[in-house]
Image: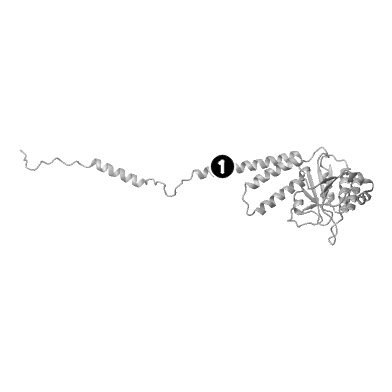
């Protein structure tokens, strides 16, 4: 199930246009986060045309509840370099190919940014991956309804095709959370030059796991490997503590064993003492022999 999530929409006409696009491609679940316009106004209804039911059934929330979704997809026209992991994007057709592998029961949120400011880095960081519509460098930003129509078109086209791997379902949020929990345990046991480097690794692996859309068998294989890494680390710590406990507490107190030469000379002296002739008894003064 795919939901289109609009962050703080400001123009009722745009909300209506998005609802119409959604209905065109068979999507009916619309979520509005802290809207600054009336999505049930005449302006919105007129732009929605025959998709008024999408507007009427829209969920309205004060804040973005990320835990309600198995996969979250951010949309942005502002891309970073190869080093900007957070904004490393997929194209709409690449996104559609990945979503094609998911079971219809999975909850997916397609997050559309604000009309003026798009999505903030903090919000993109909470998503599994990013999608962008390739456009001219001179003017890359699309109207939100135009971006939605291109993305939903690609998704609809991919989902409408039958495929032979539909029985192999990628993991959902519980499995992804467990994998990241294990990664974080490993990260916390390591020494890092700076907190930023640790955070970069956490973001990188979160995005990698999200983009990979692992099957359950693959996920359990990854978890098994991470479990071995954790056990190995614990064993090395124990061995290190044992080795330290065997080290003498005070330095310079080791007893030197007598050398072989000293032992032999001592024995010779003892033998010489035992074999020396005993002195004869001399008469006491004042006595004479007879």
Number of other residues with Cα within 10 Å of mark 1, as a class: few under 14, some 14 to 19, many 20 or more: few
* Residue 76, position as x, y percentages in the image: 81, 54
In the rendered view, tell whether residue 77 sits above or below residue 250.
below
Residue indicated by mark 1: 238
Describe residue 13's horizontal placement relative to residue 174 as left or right: right
Dividing the image into 4 quarters, which one contains the C terminus? top left
* Residue 252, position as x, y percentages in the image: 42, 50
Dividing the image into 4 quarters, which one contains the N terminus? top right
In the rendered view, tell whether residue 255 sits above or below residue 118.
above
Describe residue 116's horizontal placement relative to residue 200 as left or right: right
* Residue 201, position as x, y percentages in the image: 69, 50
Residue farthest to the left, as pictured: 290
Point 72% across, 42% down: residue: 177
**The residue tagged with tag 1: helix, strand or loop?**
helix
13 and 208: which one is in front? 13
211 and 279: which one is in front? 211
Residue farthest to the bottom, as pictured: 138
């Amino acid at each position: 199930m795919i939901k289109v999530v609009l962050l703080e929409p400001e123009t009722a006409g745009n909300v209506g246009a998005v609802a119409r696009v959604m209905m065109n491609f068979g999507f009916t679940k619309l979520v509005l986060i802290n809207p600054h316009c009336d999505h049930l106004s005449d302006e919105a209804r007129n732009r929605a045309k025959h998709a008024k039911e999408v507007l009427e059934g829209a969920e309205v929330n004060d804040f973005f509840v990320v835990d309600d979704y198995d996969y979250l997809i951010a949309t942005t026209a502002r891309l970073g370099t190869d080093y900007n992991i957070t904004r490393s994007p997929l194209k709409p057709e690449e996104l559609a190919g990945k979503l094609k592998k998911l079971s219809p029961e999975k909850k997916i949120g397609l997050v559309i940014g604000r009309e003026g400011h798009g999505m903030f880095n903090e919000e993109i960081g909470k998503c599994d991956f990013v999608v962008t519509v390739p456009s001219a460098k001179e003017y890359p930003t699309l109207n939100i309804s135009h971006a939605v129509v291109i993305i939903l078109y690609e998704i609809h086209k991919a989902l409408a095709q039958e495929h032979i791997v539909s029985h192999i379902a990628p993991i959902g949020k519980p499995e992804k959370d467990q994998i990241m929990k294990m990664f974080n345990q490993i990260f916390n046991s390591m020494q890092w030059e700076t907190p930023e480097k640790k955070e970069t690794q956490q973001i990188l692996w979160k995005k990698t796991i999200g983009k990979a859309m692992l099957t359950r068998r693959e996920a359990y294989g990854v978890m098994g490997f991470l479990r071995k890494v954790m056990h190995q680390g614990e064993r090395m710590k124990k061995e290190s503590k044992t080795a330290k406990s065997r080290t003498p507490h005070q330095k310079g107190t080791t007893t030197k064993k007598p050398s072989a030469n000293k032992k032999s000379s001592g024995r010779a002296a003892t033998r010489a003492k035992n074999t020396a002739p005993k002195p004869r008894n001399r008469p006491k003064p004042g006595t004479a022999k007879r």
